[in-house]
Amino acid sequence: MAEILFYHLTESTLEDALPGLLERSLDRGWRAVVQTGTEERRDALDQHLWTFRDDSFLAHATDREPHPTEHPVLLTTGAENPNGARIRFLVDGAVPPDLGGYDRAVFLFDGHDAPQVEAARGHWKTMKAAGHAVTYWQQTPDRRWERKA
């Protein structure tokens, strides 16, 4: 069973939080897939990950590009896992595929967006009922993560 983490964004945006989480995943030797709810969001994150910091970028590709198996981070709107990722990030209301083949899945949701919060609650119940180990993390005012459940 995959370990499932819910990250409740209250102090930063997805664009602020996602690059650091992806960097930590890559530091662990994991490949990652980021599933977005829309193609527009996928494309915006694609641009952001190349420029999010002046001294760095995250090597990645989208599911529209050739050779998706070669990229350590893949952005997609679909359920597939062509790069063999061990961790899957789900953002902006992305509907999770079967997560059994992953070591970890991370739901990131905007705490100021009522539909995202409600969707996260539904996913929490579904994941818990499926027998996954689930944890809930909320940002503190200094943008650190604090485990709440």
Image (spheres, rainbow, N blue to C red):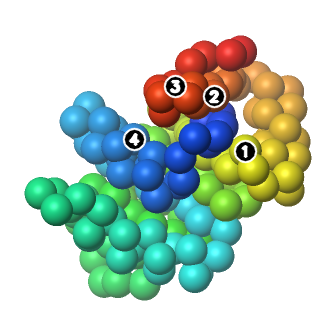
Q: Amino acid at mark 1?
A: Gly
Residues at marks 2 and 1 touching, judged by CB atoms closer than 8 Å: yes
Q: Amino acid at mark 2?
A: Gln
**Residue assigned mark 3:** 145
Q: Give x and y (percent) for residue 111.
A: 73, 44
Marks 3 and 4, the one that precedes in the sequence? 4
Q: Answer left or right for 78 relative to 28.
A: right
Residues at marks 2 and 3 touching, judged by CB atoms closer than 8 Å: yes
**Which residue is outermost to the left?**
55
Marks 4 and 1, the one that precedes in the sequence? 4
Q: Answer left or right for 124 relative to 55.
A: right
In depth, the one of 1 and 138 nearer the eye is 138
Above or below residue 116? Residue 103 is above
Instruction: Quadrant for residue 49, please give it.
Output: bottom left
Q: Secondary structure at mark 3?
A: strand
**Residue assigned mark 4:** 21
Q: Residues within 10 Å of mark 4 (few under 14, many from 20)?
A: few
Marks 1 and 3, the one that precedes in the sequence? 1
**Residue assigned mark 1:** 111
Q: Amino acid at mark 4?
A: Leu
In depth, the one of 16 and 89 nearer the eye is 16
Q: Amino acid at mark 3?
A: Trp
